[in-house]
Each structure stands twice: as structure tokens, then as C-alpha cells.
Amino acid sequence: MASIENYDFNGKKAIVRVDFNVPLDENGNITDDTRIRGALPTLQKILNDGGSLIIMSHMGKPKGKVNPKLSLSQIKDAVAKALGRDVEFAPDCAAAGDMAAALKPGQVLLLENLRFYPEEEGKPVGIDKADPGYDAAKKEMKERQKEFAKTLASYADVYVNDAFGTAHRRHASTAVIADYFDNDHKMLGLLMEKEVKAVDNILNNIKRPFTAIMGGSKVSTKIGIIENLMDKVDNLILCGGMTYTFAKAMGGNVGQSICETDKLDLALDIMKKAKEKGVNLVLGTDCVAADSFSNDAKTQVVSVMDIPEGWEGLDAGPETRKAFADVIRNSKTILWNGPAGVFEFDNFTAGSRAIADAIVEATKNGAFSLVGGGDSVACINKFGLADEVSYVSTGGGALLEAIEGKVLPGIAAVKG
Ligand code: AMP
């Protein structure tokens, strides 16, 4: 694998996979351009060296069909503004050869949404997994995926993968394309390098105590990472909606709170494993319960073990917030994924806010803090504290899989 810092792009055409899957409002305006800003160092490095750029990305889930609402033409002007130069748009990413060939040093071509082609994801369309013809269709699609990747590769001299958010997928543009470049002509982008380093700090360069804070709605979606972290962390704070699955498993009454009744054994098993491994498992003890799922609901602070019928826990209570903050403040490595309450409602942000404040304090005192996974990023942005933690990851599923210790196909393919 080549290194982007040492590579001279002068006179070269680089095809760069970025993650420009930015949120748009109903008029097609970008509501958060973090992902575009995140890719700029890589794109500018190539242009400043005297290279030309072919930028490719997906947007949303068009499932292999053209969908104008998910067209990347909507973000062309924003990309041009961010780069401070004109951007050409290729409306068909599989037929952009002539436009790519015509690029001069310093020029930029943005390809249409890769996922308008089923070949990008490489999954057969319109056929059920249970269907007898599925395996043959899958095999055929894999061949088509290779052809699609080869076409994309033919546009450029060099391939750069800077899309951490999709690095856990073996798609045409994130992994298969790398097979068409030799080791000296494929590399990770600068954003990707930062992400890899941040994950490495969490996995291999741990300063203790190491505290992981896992929140969000359900324990079932986080079980892989919780089990993996159990071997690494000193403290494991579990919060958010999963609190109530644990409370119920311990014999509590959780009222209307979100609760996975089929995961009660799993919750007990996590508690047992934490004990065996000497991990300090910290669960909520009190909560802010609401009489409906709304910002303006009536509230009361109650024990998580004794939530009245008709009420639901929507945020961590004051005793819990203090307990979480005390553990976090004394930590030297911190990972936060998932809010401690329904932070989208302003009246139920206190738990997440207490966590964020304690992380900021610990970071000021020298801790390494990594915040990642969609909702915790939205949460830290809402509090305006993103610049006060060590690293905010752009990856959701990719970050969790990397921390679970899985090899990400998008990174492995480039490393060769
Ligand atoms: P996840 O995608 O699993 O990380 O979950 C994030 C979502 O969990 C956010 O939209 C939160 O509103 C939600 N959440 C957090 N705490 C609770 C709770 N106590 N009850 C219901 N939803 C919650």
C-alpha cells in the first residue's frame, strides 16, 4: 500500500471513494456538511500536488435504481464551493470514461450515486434469498460487480479510499476496485488514516482506566461490541433504552419503557460475564420517567426497578448521572457510542449531557476520548462539544465493527 502523504499526484488522475452521504432537506439542501468537510484534506492534497480528481460516493439506499431524490447532482455546487473550484458532473458513473479522460490537472469530476447500479453493492435484485435461483443470481452479480469496479478503475491512475463510513462493506467502489491497482497505486485517504489511528488507540494503545459507554435504544444491536469490549475495558457503562431490559431481567417493573423481553437472559449473561472478568458494570439506578413519548410529557424521577404502569424511562436520573460522571471523570481512555436518553427531545438530554461534560473534563485532564456511531455524534454536535473530545468518528457500523476487532474489507483491500 502506498502512503498518501508521500505520494506525488502531479499529472495523475486519482479516483477517490468518499462518503458524501450527507443529509438533505426536502428541497435537496444539505443540512449537515460534516462529511464533505471531512474529505477535504485528501481532495486538496491531490489537487495541490497537480493531480486531477474523480470523486465517487453513494447517497442513501436507492437499491440499484435511479432515484432523482438521491442524485449527487444536488451536492455538486456544495462540493465546488468547499473545494473552491468548478466541478463537472458525470450523470452515469459507468459511462464516464470520456469525461475522466478529458480531465486536466486541477480539474474535478463528481460521479453520480454509485448505488444507482446494483453492481455497486453486488447483491442480486428482485430475487429472494430463499428462491432456488438465488445462488446463481448472486454469482452472476458478483461477476457484474467486478466488471463495474474495473470500469471505475479504468478512469484513473491511482485509487484512494477515504470513506470510513462504508469501509465495512465489500462494495465495488470500496473494496473490489482495489484489485485493479497495484500496491504502489492504492492507498487510504487522510480521513481514513485518522479513523484507523483512533480505533488503534482504543484497541491497542489503552491507557487505564478504560471506560466504554454504550447507549442507544436496544441491547440486541450492540451485543457484539459489548462482548468484545468486555475483554478490554475496566468500566462498562450501559445506558439508554437498554437500561430497562436489564432492570426487567433483575425482576424490576419497567412500565411502558422500551424493553426487549426476549433478551432478558442475554442481559443476565452480560452481568455474569462482567463479574467473571472483573469489569465494573455500571447500570442506571434511577430514571426520568415520562407519561408519554413526547418532549412535553409529564415527568417524575423514579427507580428503574419501579416504574409505574403507563410511564416510561426516557432519560437517566440524577443519581445515575452522577455515578456515570464519576466513573468517566477518572478514566484515561473513553469510548462513547449511543445516547443515555431520548436526546432528540430537549427535555430528555440531561443524561447524555452529563456523559458529554464528564468526557470533556476527562479529555482536558489527558484522557483519549473517541465518540462515534451516528446518534452519539448528533448528540455531541447538539451540545456543541465536538471539538472538546479527542476524536469524533465519521463511522457508524464501520466503527463498531472495527472496535469489535473485525477486519474491514475497505481497508484490507487497499492494504493488499
Ligand atoms: P441506537 O441507534 O441504538 O444507537 O439508538 C439511538 C436512539 O436511542 C436515539 O434515537 C434515542 O432517542 C434512543 N433512546 C435512548 N434512550 C432511550 C429510551 N430510554 N427510550 C427510548 N429510546 C431511547
Image (cartoon, rainbow, N blue to C red):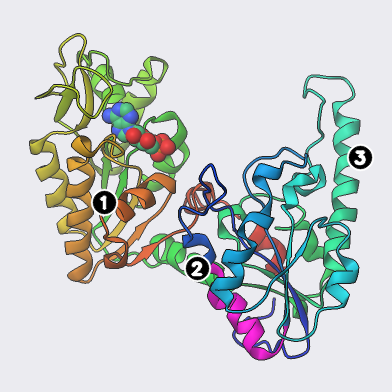
Residue at the (13%, 37%) spot, across then down: 320
The residue sitting at 63% across, 63% down in the picture is 18
Q: Quadrant of residue 134?
A: top right
Magenta-colored span: 39-51
Above or below, 366 relative to 107: above
Give the farthest residue toward the front: 27
| Whole-number angstrom distance, CA of label 2 to CA of label 3 | 37 Å
User: Which numbered dot is residue 234?
Assistant: 1
Disc 3 marks a residue whose amino acid type is: Glu
Q: From mark 2 to mark 1, how far is it between C-alphas?
A: 35 Å
Asked if the residue under mark 1 is in contact with the one under mark 2, i.e. CB atoms within 8 Å, the reply is no
Query: In this view of the protein, which residue sits in the foreground, 143 or 47?
Result: 47
> Who comes first in sequence, dot 1 or dot 3?
3
- What is the distance, in whole Å, between disc 1 and disc 3 at their CAs? 48 Å
Quadrant location of the N terminus?
Answer: bottom right
Question: In the rendered view, would you say 327 is above or below 333?
Answer: above
Secondary-structure class at tag 3: helix
Q: Main secondary structure of the magenta part?
A: helix
User: Within the magenta stretch, is there residue 42?
Assistant: yes
107 and 152: which one is in front? Answer: 107
Task: Report whether 99 appears left or right of 245.
Answer: right
Image quadrant where one finds the C terminus: bottom right
Task: Name the mark on residue 37.
Answer: 2
Any part of residue 12 in sight: yes
* Circle 3 residue: 140
Q: Secondary structure at mark 2?
A: helix
Give the image quadrant in which the ligand numbered 1 is located: top left
Counting residues from the start of the chain, the first of labels 2 and 3 encountered is 2
